Amino acid sequence: MSRKFTPKVVTANHLLEGDVIWLDRNAQWTRSLSEAQLLMDAETASVWLSKAQAQADVAVGAYLADAAEGAAGPEPTHFREAFRRRGPSNYAHGKQAEGSHV
């Protein structure tokens, strides 16, 4: 028996900088999860994942991540995605040093 589909976002890492990125509503990469397109069905999610994987010159390791609609856009539903959203954890730099992790 297959599992019920849950909402997803397409995420990857930027090829050159390593930043976590998401596909937005225009199928463009963004560094803000709140701008990501929330995908509500398996067929659409599969198409969007294919679009991401076709952009190997920009993104690496694209996959579908569980998400839920939040007040300001998609929110992670798994600790791994919440962790990735904050950026590197070895010391405060990048998003953490700037105080932005959304």
Image (spheres, rainbow, N blue to C red):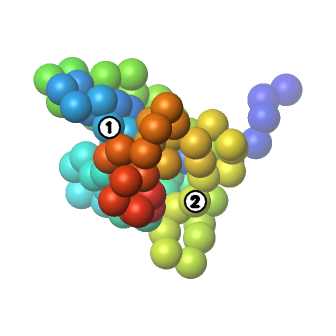
Question: Mark 1 or 2, which is nearer the eye?
Answer: 1
Mark 1 vs 2, N-terminal side:
1
Query: Is the residue marked by circle 2 packed among few (<14), some (14-19), or many (20+) residues within 10 Å?
Result: many
> Looking at the image, do the residues carrying marks 1 and 2 touch, with CB atoms under 8 Å apart?
no
List x then y, in percent, for residue 101: 44, 57
Any mark on residue 19, and which? 1
**Quadrant into which the C terminus falls:** bottom left
What's the amino acid at mark 2? Glu
For label 2, the residue is 75
Query: Is the residue marked by circle 1 packed among few (<14), some (14-19), or many (20+) residues within 10 Å?
Result: some
Residue at 85% in and 26% down: 1
List x then y, in percent, for residue 70: 59, 70
Res 11 visible: no
Q: Is residue 85 above or below residue 3?
A: below
What's the amino acid at mark 1? Asp
Residue at 57% in and 59% down: 75
The kind of secondary structure element at disc 1 is: loop
- Give the quadrant of residue 37: bottom left
**Residue reaching furthest front?**
91
Q: Is residue 38 above or below residue 44?
A: below
The kind of secondary structure element at disc 2 is: strand
List x then y, in percent, for residue 42: 56, 40
